[in-house]
Image (spheres, grey):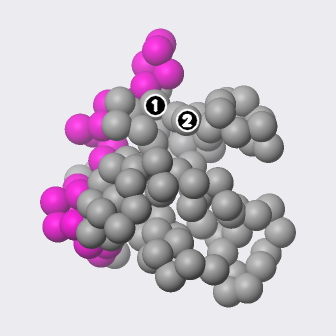
Amino acid sequence: MSHVYVEIYKIVQSIPKGRVLTYGIISHMIGGRMSAQGVGWALMALSKEKREPGYDMNSVPWQRVVNAEGGTSTHKIATIPPGLQQVLLEAEGVAFDEQGKIKLKQYIWLDAAANGTASKSSKRKP
C-alpha cells in the first residue's frame, strides 16, 4: 500500500463525527503529493474487507470527505449504493440542502483546514 494512501487514511480517520474535509484540503494537507482527484482514488481503493495494515471502509470514515461544493461524489462509484454517503453524514448530524449540498462553512473541520494538519479536536460545533 502506498505511503501517501496511508497518510490520507490517517487524516480521514481523524475527522470528528459531524465534520467534513474536502478532497482538495486533504491534498493540501499532504503537500500536494496527490491531487484532489487522487485523494478520491485513494478512498475508492478502500475495501469492504479488512486488509493489512487495517484500512478498510469500516475503519476509515470515507463519508466525511466531500467535494469543494459541499456535495457527495459517490454517485460515480458503482460499488457504493446511491445516497449512502449522504445518509451516513445525516446520521452524524450533517444537514443537506435541496440540492444535496452541505454548508461547508458550518461543517468543515476547521482545525485541520486552518492548520493543514490533523488534530484531535474541533473548535466549532455543528
Q: Name which residue type carries label 2.
A: Ser
In what element is the residue under mark 1? loop
For image coordinates 70% across by 69% down, the residue present is 56
Quadrant where the C terminus sits is: top left
At a point 40% along the width and 50% down the height, the residue shown is 36
Q: Which residue is mark 1?
A: 71
| Distance between mark 1 and mark 2 Cα atoms | 7 Å
**Residue 71 inside the magenta-drawn segment:** no
x, y percent for residue 28: 27, 60
Label 2, residues with CA under 10 Å away: few <14, some 14-19, many ≥20: some
Q: Compared with residue 30, is residue 76 higher up or lower down, i.e. above or below? A: above
Which quarter of the figure has residue 16? bottom left
Left or right: residue 17 compared with residue 110? right
**Quarter placement of the N terminus:** bottom right
- Report the magenta residues as a range: 97-119
Give coordinates of residue 58: x percent, y percent. 70, 65
Looking at the image, residue 64 sits to the left or right of residue 125; the answer is: right
Is 107 one of the magenta-colored residues? yes
Marks 1 & 2, CB-CB < 8 Å contact: yes
The residue singled out by tag 2 in the image is 73
Mark 2 element type: loop
